[in-house]
Image (tube, rainbow, N blue to C red):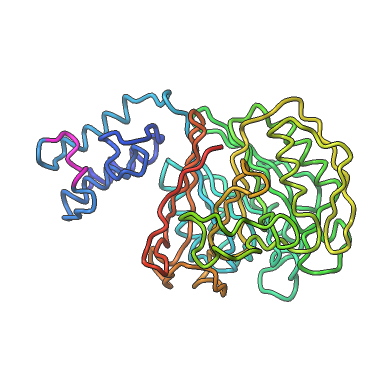
Amino acid sequence: MKFFGGLLMFFVAIVPCVAYGQVVEDVNRDGYVNGGDVTAIYNCMLNDDMTYAATCDVDGDGHVTSVDVAIVYNYLLNHDGTSDRRMSFLHISDTHSVDVTLKPALEILNSDATYSFMVLTGDFLPTETMMQEVLASEKPVFIIPGNHDSWDEGTTANSFGQSGFRQQVLNRLYPNGEVNFGDDVANYFYADVTQNGCTIRVIGLDLYEIETVGSTIKNSVIFSQKQIDWLISVLEDSGDKDGVIILTHNGFGNARSNPRDPNYINEFVSINAYTFFDTYNYFGTGDADMVPSIVEAYMTGENLVDSAFYSGYRLEKINVTTHFDSPRNNFIAHYGGHIHFDVVEYLSWHPRQLMCIVAYGGLGNGGREYNDLIKTDTGEDSYTINASNINFTTHEHKIVRLGSKKKVDGTLRESILFNF
């Protein structure tokens, strides 16, 4: 067993995820050949775990033995990974001062070489213990503020306000220029992550520039002209990246403008939200189409010229002009949270832009009747993590649910495949 532990650590620590698809070495059929397949074989051999009994016999001799482990090991050593270019990362949101999702997500991130980084899309509300857990991470964790992080300063535990979030959270996490901020006090940034020869640009937006803009009305999405100009500039410089993702706390649709299509359903849309018109719940009367319109111009090369959008309840006017020199095909998806339940689908009015909303990451269901998950207080069913597995060769985006999968109708939320 001591040798097994060392061997497994060797796999996890230094061998990247190098294979995808139904190869025999992919014992647990998760689309990858890595240390998880070794674990599955040993669990079958030593612990009588029959979960993957049908696939653990890699050499097909009718027995599960150390020979099967050796075959997986040799595959990892000899496969150069050039056939498909891949990168994977984790997505969580809305932890609300509880580490029931944060802690297992960090453990998975730092123990599995499959994953390059993690994103947390707002309403972090971290305790000091949670901050220390993130600070101890060996891999990047990118965090943006949610409405509770920014608007509730002094009224909700662990809420810091706009500039406070920058000082107490982001400046502590990235003290040495690991991310590129667009402002001295606001919370928008970009960072590039490279692994196995692939680079993803992570763009984090600050939907609550309440101090920068001088807004006094709570729970309104408010951008500054400076942030929007910065976003356009960053995208103009992103064409050479393998992939681009954008982090926001809220999604982009609401009942006033660009709602989701309630007739469209999939396994990653909450079954209680099939007919929920206002799914993304974009705060305020501002135009929820501003960021998606900029991304659409980036993807198509059809530039916006002096297009007027409005931000926040006060309807501050923002002028948008883009200068993209050609269409780009490297935009992967928008990532968000806020609504406390799962909705992963293409925007109905921009059908090539994927919106990935992950369910509430705190205890229980988050007080939203639209959450269709059966969540426990402890164990695997207590946390909600989406793993994004990106294949840059085929432009496929596979999302796999880690943690709570059971839905109220008895079905499971397991995985789904999109294109980008």
Q: Position of residue 377 (x, y in %)?
A: 43, 73
Q: On screen, 145 above or below 127?
A: above
Residue furthest out toward the front? 263
Front-most of 81 and 180? Answer: 81
Q: Give the quarter of the image for residue 49.
A: bottom left
Quadrant that contains the C terminus:
top right
Q: What segment carries the magenta color?
A: 54-60
Q: Position of residue 291 (x, y in %)?
A: 74, 47
Q: Position of residue 255 (x, y in %)?
A: 71, 63
Q: Give the quarter of the image for residue 69.
A: top left
Front-most of 46 and 147? Answer: 147
Q: On screen, 275 above or below 236?
A: below
Q: On screen, 33 above or below 275?
A: above
Does the magenta run of residues contain 265? Answer: no
Taking the spot 71% from the left edge, 39% from the top edge, the residue there is 296
Using the rendered image of the protein, determine whether residue 129 is visible from the camera's viewpoint: no
